[in-house]
Amino acid sequence: MPGYWDKLCGVIRVVDWGSQLAKNTRRWWRPMSRNSSVLLISLFLVSSGCSIAPPTENPIPAISSMSGDSQSKTLIVMLPGRGDRGDAFGTAEFDNIANSQNYDVLAVDAHLGYYIARNLLPRLHADVILPARAQGYQNIWLLGVSMGGFGALLYAQEYPGEIDGVILLAPFLGSRGLIEEIEKGGGLSAWQGDTQGYEPYEIDLWRWLKKATGSVDGTPVVLGFGEADNMAPTYDVLIEALGPSQVYKNDGGHRWTTWQPLWRRIAAALELSLPD
């Protein structure tokens, strides 16, 4: 799968250094050879304890929560952030919130090990999305928290047309330098997608977001975040490209107590964008 390893290694390297992301991300993403990239990533994974990440499973586990006795038309597939597991969504009552709006839930145990093993996207596709379609779900949305938001965007890029929308809660969107260049160039709608000096995965991510937000038939994207989050300044370009009804924010930081009320609001409003 071309570019897959580079994308997933990128999110491991940057999300774990989240406290530095808003300060000076660009210097970490200077173009480097594949050998240099792999060496840097390997040293980082060992030093940060990533070498003992939880083992992956085949199929990838997921916790199901039904909204009623019969299957809903809509399924929300949830991806956790770094350091969390699939059951974190139950602890934060994300499943109950979804069920109250008549959405079924699959909270996928997409922990850091799947990113390191480079098999998140194929496992998510084969074990979650395709079976859900076969079961008759008409609307499948991906909800990703923090690193999971980035994973959701990777899936949407890799498997176009397989999901009906993406909900991003405090997602990582690439280096600040690229985002600032897009902003200085007139925003996402004016950006030509040919900025030099950044990782290919970053360019691909913003090209996908440009396509998704720039046409009426693009994949719907919903953004939620706390204004005290260190990554909040990196969302300005996306906010400008999205409609007001697609952006949700509150006063919180990068934590579940911020994301739960955001999800409650998004879940209540999501029904308006779903087909009958």
Image (cartoon, rainbow, N blue to C red):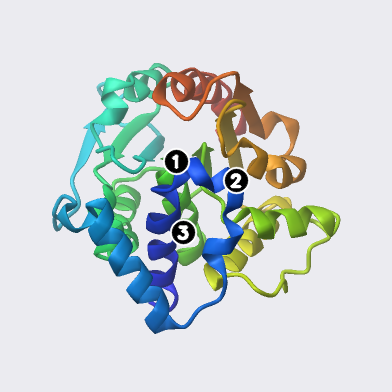
Q: Quadrant of the N terminus?
A: bottom left
> What is the number of callouts on the image?
3
User: At 40% from the left edge and 19% from the top edge, which residue is drawn?
Assistant: 97
The residue carrying pointer 1 sits among few (fewer than 14), some (14 to 19) or many (20 or more) residues within 10 Å by Cα, namely many
Q: Earlier in the sequence, mark 2 or mark 1?
A: 2
Q: Is residue 249 above or below residue 170?
A: above
> Mark 1 falls on what kind of element?
loop
Name the kind of residue labelled 2 in the image: Lys
User: Given this view, does label 3 or label 2 mark the residue nearer the observer?
Assistant: 2
Label drawn at residue 23: 2
Q: Is residue 257 above or below residue 1?
A: above
Residue annotated with mark 1: 146
Q: Mark 3 and 2 residues: CB-CB less than 8 Å, in contact?
A: no
Q: Is residue 123 visible?
A: no
Q: Earlier in the sequence, mark 3 or mark 1?
A: 1
Residue annotated with mark 3: 154
Q: Is residue 45 left or right of residue 76?
A: left
